[in-house]
Amino acid sequence: MADSAFPVGYVLAGLAMVAATVLPRLLRRSAGSPALVFVAAGVLAGLLPGGGSLDPAEHPLVVEHATELCVIVSLMGVGLALDRPLTWRGWGSTWRLLGIAMPVSIGLAALGGWALGLAPATALLLGAVLAPTDPVLASDVQVGEPTSDPGSEDEIRFALTSEAGLNDGLAFPFVHAALLLVAAGSLAWVPGWAAWQLVGKVLLGVAVGVAVGRLFARLAFAAPIDELRFAETADAVVVLAAVFLSYGVAELVGGYGFLAVFAAGMALRGWARDHDFHRTSHVFITRFERMLTMGLLVLLGYAVGDGLLAGLTWPMAMFAVLSVLLLRPLAGGLAMLGAPVPATDRRAIATFGVKGIGSFYYLAYALGQAQFPNSEVLWPTVTLAVLTSVVVHGLSATPVLRRIDQRMGRRTPEPV
C-alpha cells in the first residue's frame, strides 16, 4: 500500500498542470491571478495535520537551485517576448528604472531595515533581495507573445518586462556587496566591487548571452545544412539548450548568468523578427516556466501554512508590506519624473514592481554563502513581501491595466 502514494502524486500533478494551463485564460478578465490560487492551495495543504515540515531556511541549496531554474527559464521567455529593438531612446523607461528606481529601492529598504535594528550587511542584503521586479510572477503586467510590429507594445508593459529581464542580473552586485560587507566589516572592498561586480561581471554576462543567442539564431535560421535549421521544424525545445548553455557558460567564466540568458533571448529574437519560430519558442518557454512556477508557489503556500511567518515581528511585517506598497512606488515615481510618457503610464510603471521567485533565489544564495546577523527574520520578511505583492498586484494588475488600455484605445494582450 505504500506505493499508492505514487499514483496519487501523478493524479495531483496532472490536475495541477491542467490548472496551470487553464487558469490564466479563465482569470484573464477577473481581479485575480493563478499565483493567488496556487499559493492558497499550498497554504491549505500546509494547514492540514500530518504533513511534513518545509522550512526554506533548512534547505537553502534546494531553494536556491529550484528558484534559479525557474528564473532563468522565465528570463528567456522575457527576452523572446520583446518586439522593440534595443536603443537608448526606445528603452528610456527601462534605463530610468534600472539606473534610478533600483538603487533608490535598495537604499530605502536598507535604511529601513537598519532603522529597525538589522545589522548593516543584513539590511543591505534585504534591500537587494526586495529590489528587483520579478520576471516570473510579473506575467500580468508584461507584454504578450512576440509580434512582427515593434510599435505594438504599450509603455507600461514594455517597461516592466524589460526591467524584469535586466534587473534580476543587476541586483546581484548588491547581493555581493552585502556578502563582502559581512565578511570584511569595512568598506575597503568598494573599488574592487565596483570594477568587477558592478561592471566586469555585467559585461561578461551580456557578452556570453549575445554570443550564444547569435549562435543559436544562425543555426535556427541560416545554417548551411538543412537539418540544423530547427526554426523550419518549429523545434522549440532546443531553446532550452540556449537557456542552459548561456547560463552555464556565463557562470563558468565569472559573468552574471541571469543577464546572459536574457541577452541570449534578445539576440535570438533579433534574427528574422517576422518568423513564427519566435512565437512558438515563446509559447513553449512560457508554459514550461508556468509549470515550474506553479510547483514553487504551492510549496511557498505550504511553508506559510506550516508556520513560516511565525517568527515575524510586527515592525518587520510592516516593513515587508510597505516595501511593496510604498518604497517601490516612491522609487519608481522618482525614476519616471519627466519621462516622455503619459502620466497614467508613469504611475502604473512606478506601482507594479512585482516581487517574487527571484527574491527567494537571492536570499537562498546569500545565506548559503555567509552567516548574516539577524538572518532569522529574513525568510519570513521576504516571504510576506512576496505574498503582499502576489495579493495586491494579483488583484489589481488586470483590471487596472485593462481600464488604462480602454482609456488609451490600446489592445490588451491575451495570456499565452
Image (cartoon, helix red, strand yellow):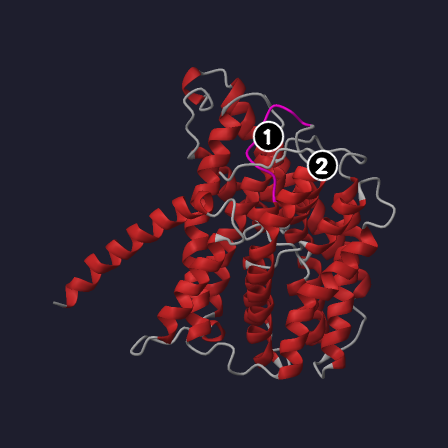
| Vertical position of residue 332 compared to residue 340: above or below | below
The boundaries of the magenta stretch are 142-150
Residue 359 shows in the view? yes
Q: Residue at x 77, y 73 (%)?
A: 111
Residue type highlighted by circle 2: Met
Q: Where is residue 1 in the image (x, y as percent from the top left)?
A: 11, 67
Q: Which circle's residue, 2 or 1, is located before the other in the chain?
A: 1
Q: Residue at x 71, y 80 (%)?
A: 119
| Vertical position of residue 211 compared to residue 328: above or below | above
Q: Do the residues labelled 2 and 1 touch (CB within 8 Å)?
A: no
Q: Residue at x 80, y 48 (%)?
A: 96
Secondary structure state at the residue bearing disc 1: helix
Residue type highlighted by circle 1: Arg
Per the model, the C-alpha gap separating discs 2 and 1 is 28 Å
Please tell me the numbered disc located at residue 408. 2
Q: Which residue is drawn at 55% across and 75% down?
A: 380
Residue 196 shows in the view? no
Which residue is tagged 1? 269
Which residue is at the front of the view, 222 or 401? 401
Q: In which quarter of the image is residue 7?
A: bottom left
Q: Residue furthest right?
A: 338
Q: Position of residue 229 (x, y in %)?
A: 46, 21
